[in-house]
Amino acid sequence: MQLNDLPRMTPPRLKALRDSGVDGIGDLLYLFPRRYIDRSTVLPIREISSGQTVTVIGRILQAEEAGFGRNKRLHVTIFDGTGRLEGVWFKGLKFFKKRFKPGKVVSFYGTVKQFGTSLSMSHPDVEDIEDGDTAGRGLVPVYPSTNFFKTTYISSLTIQRWIAQILQRQRFEEYLPDYMLRDYRLPQRRDALTSIHIPEHIGQPAAGLRRFKFEELLLFQLSMQQLRQTRIEQNPGAMLESGDLTRDFVTRVLPFKLTEGQLRAVHDIVQDISSGKQMNRLIQGDVGSGKTVVAVLALLMALDSGYQGAMMAPTEILAEQHYHTLTEYLTPLNIRVRLLTGNQNTALRRDVLTDIEGGKAQIVVGTHALIQDKVRFHRLGMVVIDEQHRFGVMQRSNLLSKGTHPHVLVMSATPIPRSLAMTLYSDLDVTLIKGLPAGRKPISTVVRFDKNRPDIYRFVHGEITKGGQVYVVFPLVEESESLDLKDATMGFEQLRDLFPDFQVGLIHGRMKSTEKDLVMQAFASGSLHILVSTTVIEVGVNVPNASVMIIEHAERFGLSQLHQLRGRIGRGSRKSYCILMTDVKRSKEARFRLETMSKTQDGFEIAEADLKLRGPGDFLGTKQSGLPSFRFADIIEDQPIVEETRDLARKILREDPGLEHPEHQGLSHVFRRYFDSKSHYFGMG
């Protein structure tokens, strides 16, 4: 059956469908409604009042333009026998005027406003009610029609009738095995599609949609588990063990004892690297939980066993920071650490590459430049990836295939909520580091306003006098005419005038690396008392005496970013304070973010709140962050299904690795198609 075979299919409609990505009847079947009009909840116009979000059905009395120039608008009046209501449009007037002919019956869905005695809706969702169909259909699906089909309007009723024809005439193959449908209470494919497109009651579509979410997430989880088997479990990892370097680091270099969380993480790593299989483990911990020390121990175990180690970071700033940290830690052990980034001059880069290939570079720190083909390691045994969520599965796979299949330890300084971790990291074993290192004290976080500044500056003066240091963070480097924000440069000058007895420094992203390093070193050594900064210090050096952080225009920052910034203080034994400065006029969302920050220091709780606010793509900082795209599933809302399908995928591949059992024949067929279509994501393309 083809699209051309559908009744009342015209060339303009066919073109509109194809322009919108509907190329065949399969695409049409999986074009699911955006919402449903429940006729049982359609209100007579005389019964509605201002502020309600409702559906009304009426006959068009008139469609008239009003106003001039930019204020031009279209008023469409409908009457349902009980009263009148106006739909008002400010855009697309020509299109809507042509569409709204007097005498047609339509439904309007939107929020009602009252002006005098008149009721109106601004840009309501509209559905044509065709062929006198003003009653009789209980639940009406609303498809992405006017927004989706740009060139020609196609009503939801037309789409529903087409799909009803396909469901009657098309043969459907069921891919999911009987036991799965039974155990997880999933409808057959045809029944699921019928319940979505032609539901009899309001609960039916959800049950049908759950089946397709389950199927989609199962295929993804099967792909991740198979990737784990083929890329990791079949690769014999180097047999590593701790030796003199690891022992000396713990007993002579570290000035503190490892926490229980750190010891548990080290234990998991030791188990992995002595198993004979390639390690692929994620270390997740909150800001300041001590992940870097765990990473250093993993690298030292490689060195103790005669291998090289590498640490990869997503940005040059972060790579440089790790390089300085590792150099500081490992110089007492006479370990040679080299830095490899994209902006090094040719001579230096050649020197570093020679050291890597010859084995003189025992540990290499760098950006994604580390995984380029021209970088050849002498004997790579351990790779640590920081800020893992900024690298996709493909980049991780490239690392796994480097040299002699090195062990891979990935870290996330951004706490990743459980639902997201189970999606992004299904191919990884996960260790959580809970708790903070000994001696750390909770950070007091408060929200304050401009009127509180005199008190805040008196408090800052007292803290510095007692030996503390202060960060002041601004969202911009220089003043912007478009945003009424205090900028770091002006803030630096004001604070220098306010605190003439103290040393004030400035650091921002536009400075050269050498300039930034000098300022950060001065702050770390204590010769600077106040450091004015942009968010460049989100990843910065460890300054134990930094006990106060003032964040200007805190409402402009995201939750996770605020949490990362706050993590720069509270790193020593001093009581620390984070002061969130904000305008009295704040959006509801900004108020929620600041309240969340003042209530909790739990990074995972903050991450869950941030994920709900921003969605997965924005939460991870970039749309190309390695997050797969899902057609039906929402990994935030559908966390129970994410967990179900992950456990099921592991069980299936454990018992039937090749999907060769008779009950898995259909699943195997659709799985191969799915895996091939996502090959770019899984690093196979």
Image (cartoon, grey):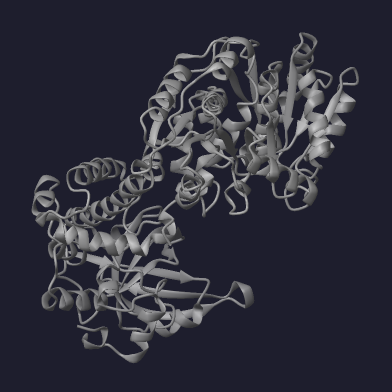
Q: Which residue is painted at 26% across and 83% down in the image?
A: 3
- The foreground one among 402 and 617 is 402
Image quarter hosting the N terminus: bottom left
Q: Position of residue 481 (x, y in %)?
A: 78, 52
> Is 546 positioned to the left or the right of 224 in the image?
right
Q: Position of residue 70 (x, y in %)?
A: 62, 73
- The foreground one among 656 and 355 is 355
Q: In the rendered image of this protein, does residue 138 appear above or below residue 431?
A: below
* Residue 242 in view in this figure: yes
Image quarter hosting the C terminus: bottom left
* Residue 45 in view in this figure: no
Q: Position of residue 555 (x, y in %)?
A: 62, 38
Q: Position of residue 444 (x, y in %)?
A: 59, 18
> Is 448 positioned to the left or the right of 89 in the image?
right
Q: Which residue is painted at 49% across and 83% down in the image?
A: 94
Locate residue 467: give its quadrant.
top right
Q: In the rendered image of this protein, does residue 466 appear above or below residue 588?
A: above
